[in-house]
Image: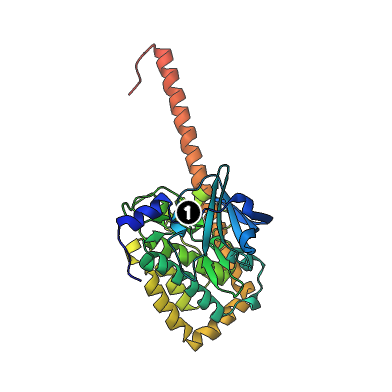
Amino acid sequence: MPRRRGGSAGERALSGETFVRIPFADLEFFEHCGGGSYGTVYRANWQPRNMEVAVKKLLLIENEAEILSVLSHKNIIKFYGAVSEPPNYCIVTEYAANGSLFEFLMKSESNDLTNKLIIAWAMDIAKGLNYLHEEAPFKVIHRDLKSRNVVISADNMLKICDFGASRFHMHTTRMSLVGTFPWMAPEVIQSLPISEACDSFSFGVVLWEILTREIPFKGLEGLQIAWLVVEKNERLTIPTECPRNFYDLMMQCWEGNPKKRPNCRQILHILDAMSHDRQLEHHCNSFLQNKNQWRGEIEATLERLKKLERELSNKEQILRDRERRLKTLEYNLRRDSGVSHPII
């Protein structure tokens, strides 16, 4: 699909004129089924259509409805409309019966995943991102891609959701710090100018999640992760048993220089080639079945990083204590000598 640039379509999208307004009374709410930084999600029935939907309650209707209203792709969550009646602000989308990718990975067993499924799901995510970056009416950078923001439809297809952090990429490339630290590219952490390459970085982290069924940088706080990724150039540990094809793809996605990362079209080409590699299929399935043999590598790295961060904190505390002692000494010298000006 050719991309439309500027003009009335963009103005309509950005003014919020393009989406259906749904009366709050038309929604019958059921159980809570997810949520995050940008809202709480419920399963609901859209009564006039007798349709099962997902409803995300928000404090305000801002960019998300405007962005979703111009998107249409099988690997992007389908948008039906929004409720804009104060204080009941909501986004109404299709309901993904199989929950989030994160939930699936946390409860899955080795035999729930295969090389074939991993590649198919990785391609689903890459296709969705490629649409956002290259095929949508306006280029969109997601900025918060993670397994919690990917859902599994009833027919086992992955769909990208939660566009609360997303932006149309038209007038500026400098954006505020948003997202979730373990999935964030170094340039996002530093609030530097960004491009769609930051989504490629996050894609690499989601692929790591699928392969390892582990939580990225588990046990580390956000600012600790930020320091490790930016200042120490640390990345998630890829077990030595991981197939080389996957290792290479993840490391390419995690390049510090955004220009060196593959775009989503290139990622799709890589994944397609991997899907025809019979040797990879055997190696990957063996890797998945033998998690007990390589999980310790990830845990060892986490312990090393925690120790590194503790040592840094201790050094900072020592410097602060030294600075306080010097200030106290200076104050006492000035007081005892009767000098009113600072000692140089």
Tell which of 235 and 137 is nearer to you. 137
Query: Is there any visible trace of residue 165 in the rendered image?
Result: no
Q: Can you give x and y, in whole percent of width and height, for residue 65 in the image?
A: 48, 54
Colour scheme:
rainbow
Could you tell me which residue is drawn at 67 percent across and 55 percent down? 28
For the view shown, which residue lies furthest in the top direction? 338
Q: Can you give x and y, in whole percent of width and height, for residue 242 in the image?
A: 52, 75
Residue 24 appears left or right of 237: right
Query: Is there any visible trace of residue 176 in the rendered image?
Result: yes
Tell which of 193 and 30 is nearer to you. 30
Q: Say which residue label 1 marks.
A: 64
Q: Can you give x and y, in whole percent of width and height, for residue 201 in the image?
A: 43, 63
For the view shown, which residue lies furthest in the right direction? 31
Could you tell me which residue is drawn at 49 percent across and 66 percent down? 76
Q: Can you give x and y, in whole percent of width and height, for residue 224 in the image?
A: 50, 50
Q: Is residue 198 above or below residue 238?
A: above
Residue 91 appears left or right of 262: right
Could you tell me which residue is drawn at 54 percent across and 76 percent down? 118
The C terminus: image quadrant: top left
Quadrant assignment, res 214: bottom right
Quadrant assignment, res 115: bottom right
Residue 338 appears left or right of 240: left
Q: Could you say whether the residue bearing mark 1 is in a helix, strand or loop?
A: helix
For the view shown, which residue lies furthest in the bottom direction? 278
The N terminus: image quadrant: bottom left
Could you tell me which residue is drawn at 47 percent across and 28 percent down? 325
